[in-house]
Image (cartoon, rainbow, N blue to C red):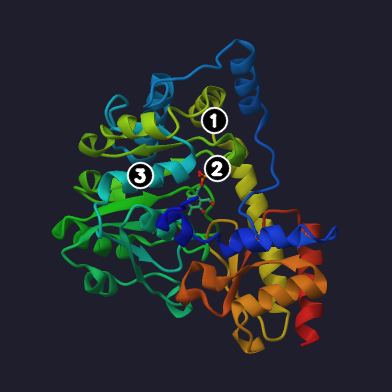
Amino acid sequence: MKISKMANEISPSLTRKLFDMSKKYDDVIDFTLGDPDYQTPDYIKKAGCEAIMSGKTKYSANAGLPELRRVVSQRIKKETGIDYDPDSEIQITVGAMEGIFMTLCCLIDKDDEIIIPAPFWVNYKHMTQMLGGKPVIVDSDEEHDFVITSDALVNAITDKTVAMIINSPNNPSGTVYDHDTLEKICEVAKQRDIVIIWDECYKSIVFDDAHFSSVLDFDGMKEHTVVVNSCSKRFSMTGWRVGYLAGPAELISNMPKLQENIAACVSLPSQYAAIAALGGDDEASDEMKRGFEKRRNVLVEGINNIDKLSCKYPKGTFYALVNIKKTGMTSEEFAYALLESVHVAVVPGITYGDACEGFVRIAYTMNEDRIIEGVTRIKRFVDSL
Ligand code: PLP
């Protein structure tokens, strides 16, 4: 059988590799996937169940249920003050993931370039490559909180650049882009006519005095931005697979055509659950955020008590990058040895680009006792080196 070059060239991510390897051990502490242990709140589950029991189990419009698009538009208006027309500027997607893929489908012709600041969620790079585009990675470093400078961005732009993807709060670094940095990036995007794919799927998980700023805060940015979001992280709905895009009609009007040929629509019960989630208040997601903050504190404190390891307090998300450089190991060597010796699974930083070599990512998606047990084992491992 002939397998396409594209399929041959995509390799599974190290995140999934470590997750799969961890399943060999009954007593493993698995810090790999970004899939929190919190349950979807009951009122959202109920809306999904009621949809099923009342026979709402068919296809919907390719763009998604009109009622859900209206709810999304109202939520964005409440949070940003910006109007999006539910009929022409909102698309319902199979998680943020399909939203990013469809956006790239709309933007990329062969060899077009997509700027991806590192560290990055690895799927951005793979999706760009699957579509015949070229990922252009712009590095950042720990000293600058893993935020790229606008100079680095300008240097990366060529006449093939069509878009850049910004993820704030960021997976894997936990960085939240500040207002001034975003303002400079937006100026560049406007001057050079570059689309910003704005992945804000961790927007509800911001800690301490960090403030969530959006590219939509700046004049004229609606025309240059595709907002990507989903219910996955905000309402602990990763398995429901429901998200959305908001952007200019010129771009979003193409999405139903793409959706017709990809998934037809998002599962209808999930769309009804999303109406309950996005149309409701944020009490449950605020409570989850407070839980993540406590877990973060336990984790970072524990890691910083281990000789040779260090970890800055992430400002958002439920991920932390642990600096392992003093062990002298690469991030892959560290992750494999840690798993084999004390049955703790973490993701090697190299997964997220060269900028993250010398780090491993820990997802603090489990209760504090498990985190403490994981950190105790990591200490035992590092002390034994
Ligand atoms: N964007 C980022 C940065 C992510 O980390 C993830 C999932 O981990 C996604 C998008 C996709 O989320 P979903 O498709 O579940 O909405």
Q: Residue placed at 36% from the left, 56% from the top?
A: 128
Label 2, label 1: how many angstroms apart (C-alpha)? Answer: 9 Å
Q: Nearer the viewer, residue 218 or 128?
A: 128
Measured in 3D between alpha carbons, the distance from the residue under mark 1 to the one under mark 3, in whole angstroms, is 18 Å
* Helix, strand or loop status at disc 3: strand
Question: Dot 2: few (<14), some (14–19), or many (≥20) neighbours within 10 Å?
Answer: many
Q: Residue furthest right?
A: 26
Q: Amino acid at mark 3?
A: Val
Q: Amino acid at mark 1?
A: Ala
Occupied quadrant, residue 180: bottom left
Q: Does the CB distance between marks 2 and 1 fall below 8 Å?
A: yes
Q: Mark 1 highlights which residue?
A: 277
- Looking at the image, is mark 2 or mark 1 earlier in the sequence? 2
In the picture of the structure, the residue carrying the numbered disc 2 is 234
Q: Nearer the viewer, mark 1 or mark 3?
A: 3
Q: Position of residue 153 (x, y in %)?
A: 27, 69
According to the picture, the residue beneath numbered tag 3 turns out to be 227
Which numbered disc, 3 or 2, marks the residue that appears first in the sequence?
Answer: 3
Position of 92 relative to 171 (above/below): above
Mark 2, secondary structure of its residue: loop
Residue 85: x percent and y percent? Answer: 28, 28
Q: Secondary structure at mark 1?
A: helix
